[in-house]
Image (cartoon, helix red, strand yellow):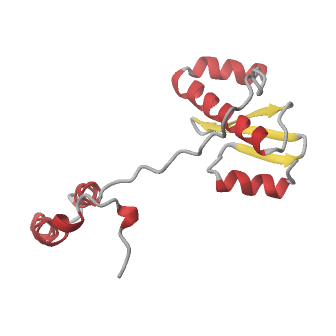
Amino acid sequence: MLSIEKAKTFCKQNGIKGLDIRGSNSIRIVIKKNNQRFNFSLDNASLTTEGLLLAAAKVIELKKLAKYSYPEFIKAHQQQDLPPLALAPLTKPIEPPKKVQKPLQQFIDCFYLSKENILAPSSISHYRKKIDRYIVPKFGLVPVEEIKPM
């Protein structure tokens, strides 16, 4: 059993969002949709790593339901109808989603698109020539997260 602070730290370290941990027996799922906040009580959740991972899986399930079947999501919220968390024993831990690594070229393309209505066409052309000549050949395919100062 984890303390409340350790449970919150575990969630933060593993990228688990959407859980409101208030006490050892008080965990809520919080889903934000259409500028509204929907709370679901988790009565049978425990403050263990396995319990938090199961609750995180339930958050993902509810977010998908809210995105793809909003009327069913509203119905589940009104009835507070959640299937039990422990549907099957965990065989291996659920890994947090990995960040998508964008190559620098994709970041540069987004930069040009964001500046096309702000900068003069000649400025964008000048930037493009310099960046395409000196930066893209060496770093264009390198993920942005891997580029560090010297």
Q: Does 40 sit left or right of 43 as displayed? A: left
Q: Residue at x 38, y 74 (%)?
A: 148
Q: Residue at x 52, y 23 (%)?
A: 68
Q: Residue at x 56, y 28 (%)?
A: 64
The answer to which image quadrant residue 71 occupies is top right
Q: Quadrant of the C terminus?
A: bottom left
Q: Hey, which residue is sitting farthest front in the picture?
A: 91
Q: Does 64 sit left or right of 79 as displayed? A: left
Image label count: 0
Image coordinates of residue 91 in percent, x first then y, are 68, 32
Q: Residue at x 72, y 53 (%)?
A: 10
Q: Hey, which residue is sitting farthest bottom in the picture?
A: 150
Q: Nearer the viewer, residue 147 or 89?
A: 89
Up/down of 18 relative to 113, above or below? above
Image coordinates of residue 149 in percent, x first then y, are 37, 79
Up/down of 144 relative to 60, above or below? below
Image coordinates of residue 135 in percent, x first then y, are 19, 70
Q: Does 53 sit left or right of 123 as displayed? A: right
The answer to which image quadrant residue 28 occupies is top right
Q: Does 147 sit left or right of 21 as displayed? A: left
Image coordinates of residue 40 in percent, x first then y, are 76, 32
